[in-house]
Image (spheres, grey):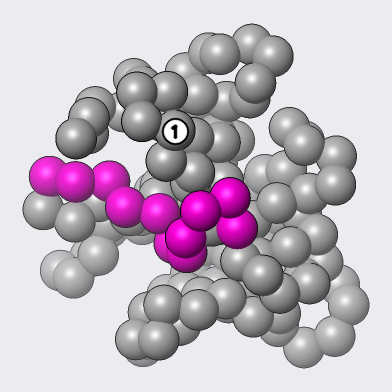
């Protein structure tokens, strides 16, 4: 498995290195968010958020529905993230978080490994 960050790409048209907007690091977790889609080497989809576990980058979700997405791809972005207990809140420009409809604000449950919308439409 290819775990080098330089192999993440920002979008299908430019194939450049994915932009990181913010990092979250604590005793348990290491997350990066920004503007990146998949890893070129094995086409694993991350969609703007990735978690580093030991030495392996893992997506938050599975398949193309991992992370967050917008109908205006490649213009989805995560600008900020905050962790509170087992919940990871993300804010940015997107329409979907995992398989849930979410407008710019979503939460990822670290125990259940699922996405949902926060409150109502943002």
Q: Nearer the viewer, residue 99 or 35?
A: 99
The percent coordinates of residue 21 (x first, y second) are: 53, 39
The percent coordinates of residue 71 (x first, y second) are: 85, 47
Range of the magenta residues?
A: 55-65
Badge 1 element: loop
Please give left or right for residue 64 compared with residue 86 in the image.
right
Q: Is residue 113 visible?
A: yes
Up-down: is 48 above or below 91?
Answer: above
Q: Quadrant of residue 73?
A: top right
Q: Which residue is mark 1?
A: 43
Please give left or right for residue 33 compared with residue 111 in the image.
right
Residue drawn at x 74%, y 63% is 96
Q: Quarter of the image for the C terminus: give it.
A: bottom right
Q: Is residue 93 visible?
A: no
Q: Nearer the viewer, residue 81 or 37?
A: 37
Please give left or right for residue 71 compared with residue 98 in the image.
right
Residue drawn at x 46%, y 82% is 109
Q: Nearer the viewer, residue 98 or 122?
A: 98
Up-down: is 82 above or below 37?
Answer: below
Q: Which residue ends up furthest to the left in the rendered image? A: 54
The percent coordinates of residue 91 (x first, y second) are: 66, 62
Queried whether the magenta region covers residue 24, the answer comes back as: no
Queried whether the magenta region covers residue 61, the answer comes back as: yes
Up-down: is 72 above or below 114?
Answer: above
Residue drawn at x 19%, y 46% is 56
Q: Quadrant of residue 40?
A: top left
- Binning the other alpha carbons within 10 Å of mark 1 as few (below 14), some (14 to 19) or many (20 upward) gives some
Up-down: is 65 above or below 4?
Answer: below
Residue drawn at x 56%, y 13% is 15
Please give left or right for residue 97 compared with residue 93 in the image.
left
The percent coordinates of residue 78 (x first, y second) are: 62, 50
């Amino acid at each position: 498995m290819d775990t080098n960050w330089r192999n993440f790409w920002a979008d299908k048209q430019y194939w450049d290195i994915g932009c990181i907007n913010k990092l979250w690091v604590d005793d348990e977790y290491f997350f990066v968010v920004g503007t990146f889609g998949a890893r070129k080497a094995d086409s694993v989809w991350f969609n703007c958020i990735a978690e580093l576990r030991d030495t392996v980058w893992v997506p938050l979700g599975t398949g193309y529905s991992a992370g967050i997405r917008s109908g205006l791809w490649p213009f989805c972005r995560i600008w900020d993230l905050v962790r509170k207990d087992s919940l990871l809140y993300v804010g940015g420009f997107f329409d979907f978080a995992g398989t849930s409809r979410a407008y710019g604000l979503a939460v990822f449950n670290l125990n259940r490994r699922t996405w949902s919308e926060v409150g109502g439409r943002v």
